[in-house]
Amino acid sequence: MSRTGAWSLRAPSPLPGWGLSLGITLTLLSLVVLLPIGALLTRAAGIGPAELWATIGSERVLSALALSFRAALIAALFNLVFGLALAWVLVRYDFPGRKLVDAAVDLPFALPTAVAGIALTALYAPNGILGGPIQDWFGFRVAYTEIGIWIALVFVGLPFVVRTVQPVIAEIEQEVEEASATLGATRLTTWRRVILPMLTPALLTGFALSLARAVGEYGSVIFIAGNLPFKTEIAPLLIVIRLEEFDYNGAVAIALAMLAISFVLLLLINLIQVWSRRHTAGA
Amino acid sequence: MADMTISPPALSAPVPRPARFTRCTDEPRWLRWTLTILVLAVLAVLVVIPLASVFFEALRDGWALAVESLAEPDAWAAVKLTLIVAAVAVPLNALFGVAAAWALTKFQWRGKAVLLTLIDLPFSVSPVVAGLCIILLFGANSDFGGWLVANGYPIVFAVPGIILATMFITFPFVARELVPLMTEQGKAEEEAALTLGASGWRMFLTVTLPNIKWALLYGVLLCNARAMGEFGAVAVVSGKIRGETATMPIMIEMLYNEYLSVAAFTMAAVLTLLALVTLTLKSLLEWRYADQLAAAGGRH
């Protein structure tokens, strides 16, 4: 084992277990994650670009992909705003039962998606406790429409923004806000010019996590969506349908499109994050 | 609920307090009230009412029917399968988490950033796509999978596939808890143990493990909750054979689609209770051992 040298793989260390721990890590990582994803990419390469494009370009696939990403963006945007408000209330305001509410925020992480799916459907169905009154008073249906999909995705993505922003709010030194106030800023200006810039990186991280989760979400959506082709059929469901038809190539094409779009979106959010960090660091 | 918040002024003599004084770092009172009520209302509609409705629907026709539906042999098989899958997948992921955190935090080497990114990869892959990947690698149609099936070791539409799919989805959970904590702790204590003559394993068992035990438990807790509840990835690879490859979430879907509402919601209620226990334990860990959990943000 080479221990020194500028081009050696690792810096010398007296601690044991590098080989063992890295061995376990790489073996499990390859077996569980890398090889399966590799199998998908190999299969996609075998299909060839022409057939991939033809499958992805079909009207049903395009509308499923558009729905998945549109609904995920809407849910993640809602969670961005609502998560910020919730985190702020939890850190700054005191009210009875605050710790209980704080614990309840994590429920969407702990509750299985299928359970969330049937519970939300029972509530928001036209004969449900919430779905009935909404239809009577406001005249629209929630379950079995795109609105139902939004609700399911808001549910599963709810904790991400709260949990990334909450610790950052807790660490804000209030002297900074006081300084801003003594210099004549209104509370709104302080919020816009002092607090929000400090929270931006965490907000973006939470947004990205929430978005990534919502795009691929399956369990909570399929019950409430109604699953009508061209209308409320999400992309992951279409993959399952293709698999049930033994159309593996079709499934692979949709999966590849989802991976590619997710990748581009996350890359974009990362770039904004780098930019905003540099922006606030210079201020 | 009220006794959970600390209210010192009520006890002693009334503290003189300016009547209409708000600090400059406070929002106006009306805004505070509006925001709090609004946030709590949304949370109630989105989280609390659905939670309550699971139990309401399960017990709609009385306890007897609910208990009866759980006593069905297929329901039992689903519970057992879910426990088996979690019992294999969670320890393996805990092993992975500790090993990955050790390699990533105690040594300086090239490629660390790449490994960190790869560990997070399952977070950005749809569960359905994860299941598809496993079918493509291990399914009877692939070279490798075909060979396994021919030799009597089917993976897809069998228990090993369900375990693999569950592991894929829960892969980053333990590692993500341990990496920030162990980075912060550094390696001075381990080096001291070695200097004092401890063997590698002794150092790990008596120095490292006590330092990370609460964070490890925290990660295992979250990993287990997700493992028992995973639906999308398992639905793709399980084949949904009743009594054989149907886990509890899959069973919920099958019962629900057969309009067996009470049975579906009873099984859902069991998983909901599990989620509530998980949340309680998680909150306890957070309150008591906050300093020994990952100090960095972004916990989940």
Image: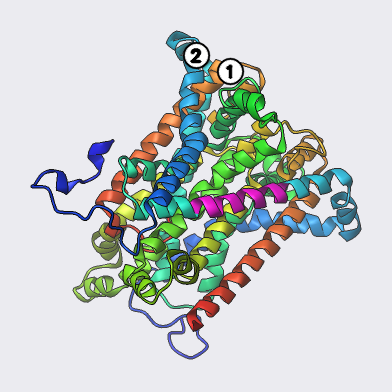
For the question of whether residue A234 can be seen, the reply is yes
Badge 1: residue crowd in 10 Å (few <14, some 14–19, many ≥20):
some
Tags 1 and 2 touching, CB below 8 Å: yes
Give the residue number, with chain letter if any, for mark 1. B261
Badge 2: residue crowd in 10 Å (few <14, some 14–19, many ≥20):
some
In the rendered image, which quarter is residue B90 located in?
top left
Q: Earlier in the sequence, mark 1 or mark 2?
A: 2
- Residue visible at 80% across and 56% down in the picture: A44
Residue range in magenta is A68-83
For the question of whether residue B236 can be seen, the reply is no
Residue A18 vs B68, above or below: the answer is below
Give the residue number, with chain letter if any, for mark 2. B60
Real-space Cα distance between discs 1 and 2? 10 Å
Side of B165 where B145 appears, left or right: right
- Residue visible at 65% across and 50% down in the picture: A74
Chain letter of the residue carrying label 2: B
Q: Which mark is residue A144?
A: none
- Residue visible at 66% across and 18% down in the picture: B258
Protein image colouring: rainbow
- Residue visible at 54% across and 17% down in the picture: B263
Closest to the observer, A25 or B130? B130
